[in-house]
Every structure is written in C-alpha cells, then in structure tokens.
Image: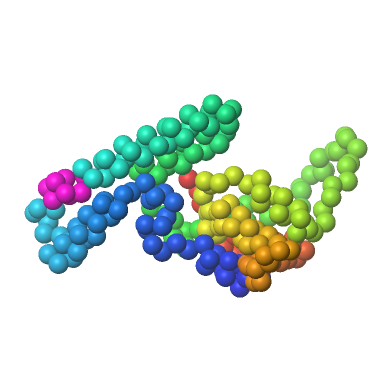
C-alpha cells in the first residue's frame, strides 16, 4: 500500500520551478534575468558588497512588472466569476493569489511532521472512559460504510475544487482529475488509449485498500500545523 502511494506521489513532483502553477505569472524575460543573476552570483560568490544594489537595478523592475500584470489578471478573472455568481471559486483563487504573493514560513521538515503526527495519534487514540458513557437519546441511523466503488470515487474527484494545496501527499485535485481523464480516454469506445488509465486504477486500488484495512500510509497521516 505504501509503495503504491509513493509511486503516485512521485508523479506529483514538479522539479522545474517554471512549470509550477504559482509561477506561471512570471514572464520568460524575468526567468532569463533570474538565470543570469544566479550564474553571476555563483561565479563571484554573490559579491556581498554589491548584491543588494544589483538585485534592485536588474531583477526587481522585471518582477515588479510581472506582479502588476498578474494582479490585473487575477482581478479580471475574479470579477468574471463574481458576475457569474461563483463567489466561492473567486474566493479560493483570491486566497491562492494572496498566499503566493505573501511572505510564508519555511515548509516543515519530515521529522517535524512525524513528531506532530505521533502527538496527535496519542491525543486522539481510543481510551476507556473513566465514567459512564454519554447517553444516546436519538434513534441510531444506519450509515453506508461499504468500500467506495470506482464510480463513487470518480464522482468525488469531479466535484473537487482546483487550487487547493496538496499537503504532505503533494496530490492536488488537478492530479486526480488528470488521472481520471486518462481512464476515460482508455474507456473511449472509438479511440481507446491502452494504458492511459493505469494511474487511475492504482489510485482506486489505494483508496479501497485504505477503506478495507483501516491502514493509512504514514505520509498521509502527517499533519501541518499553521
């Protein structure tokens, strides 16, 4: 189960910063300046005396212009969403823009997440009540607790909202939807693409295994406290 999860998580890695969604607002001219600045800093060991003035003179004007253009695009997109009555989606995009343009703390390391997870496992573990149980004054209702079918998982993925953080698993809604799209291409009766749905099948297998066994891969139990 953990092996399957690690394979899926590896597919979510995006090592090239230029391909990160949060960096798609940066123009190619700015990336060229960043590369040139990086090479220069490496060759001259940053030359501490002139580093700050160099950044102001070369890099910041380009980045500032990109920031203004990005803000205009976000504002225009949100106005269109609000005009359509989709206030919730507009709010999510606004939060994402604010998060990416604001100062953020460094991401927690693996050891910190493991320690926090252990603390919460201990905090919420099942214990024997020292007193009488809380009385139930309503009629119990049967809740469907069967293993989710492929169709149920598909419906849930299609309803998921884009733009959310992937958390410790790195899996975002866009990844799940891309894998589902591959499965649908494979199932196409006219232009079936063999093997396109393999990743989706692994995901379904993982979700159903977690449901059936009650065991969750360790990285999925990591929590990030803000």
Dominant secondary-structure state across the stretch colored magenta: helix
Query: Can you see residue 127?
Result: no
Tell me what residue is drawn at x 13 percent, y 50 percent: 54
The image shows residue 95 at horizontal and vertical percentages of 47, 38
Residue 91, percent from left and from top? 52, 34
Q: How is the image coloured?
A: rainbow
Considering only vertical position in the picture, is 98 above or below 186?
Answer: above
Relative side of 118 to 44, left or right: right
Which residue occupies the extreme right position in the image?
139
Region rendered in magenta: 52-60
Is residue 171 magenta-colored?
A: no
Q: Is residue 54 part of the magenta span, yes or no?
A: yes
Q: Nearer the viewer, residue 158 or 192?
A: 192
Residue 86 horizontal/vertical position (percent): 58, 31
Q: What x and y, as percent, mark residue 22?
A: 41, 49
The answer to whether 56 appears left or right of 163 in the picture is: left
Residue drawn at (20%, 49%), measured in percent from left and top?
Answer: 59
Query: Of all residues shown, which one is farthest toward the left?
Result: 49
């Amino acid at each position: 189960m953990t092996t399957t999860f690690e394979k899926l998580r590896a597919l979510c890695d995006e090592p090239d910063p230029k391909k990160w969604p949060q960096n798609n607002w940066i123009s190619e001219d700015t990336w060229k300046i960043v590369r040139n600045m990086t090479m220069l800093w490496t060759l001259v060991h940053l030359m501490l005396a002139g580093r700050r003035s160099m950044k102001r003179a070369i890099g910041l004007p380009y980045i500032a212009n990109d920031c203004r253009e990005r803000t205009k695009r976000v504002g225009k997109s949100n106005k269109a969403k609000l005009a359509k009555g989709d206030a919730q989606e507009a709010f999510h995009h606004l939060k994402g823009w604010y998060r990416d343009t604001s100062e953020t703390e460094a991401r927690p390391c693996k050891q910190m997440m493991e320690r926090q997870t252990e603390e919460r496992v201990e905090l919420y573990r099942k214990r024997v009540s020292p007193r009488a149980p809380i009385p139930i004054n309503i009629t119990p209702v049967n809740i469907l607790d069967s293993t989710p079918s492929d169709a149920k998982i598909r419906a849930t993925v299609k309803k998921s909202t884009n733009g959310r953080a992937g958390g410790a698993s790195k899996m975002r809604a866009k990844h799940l939807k891309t894998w589902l799209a591959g499965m649908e291409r494979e199932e196409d009766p006219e232009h079936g693409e063999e093997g396109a749905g393999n990743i989706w099948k692994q995901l379904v297998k993982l979700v159903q295994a977690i449901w059936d066994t009650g065991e969750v891969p360790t990285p999925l139990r990591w929590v990030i406290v803000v």
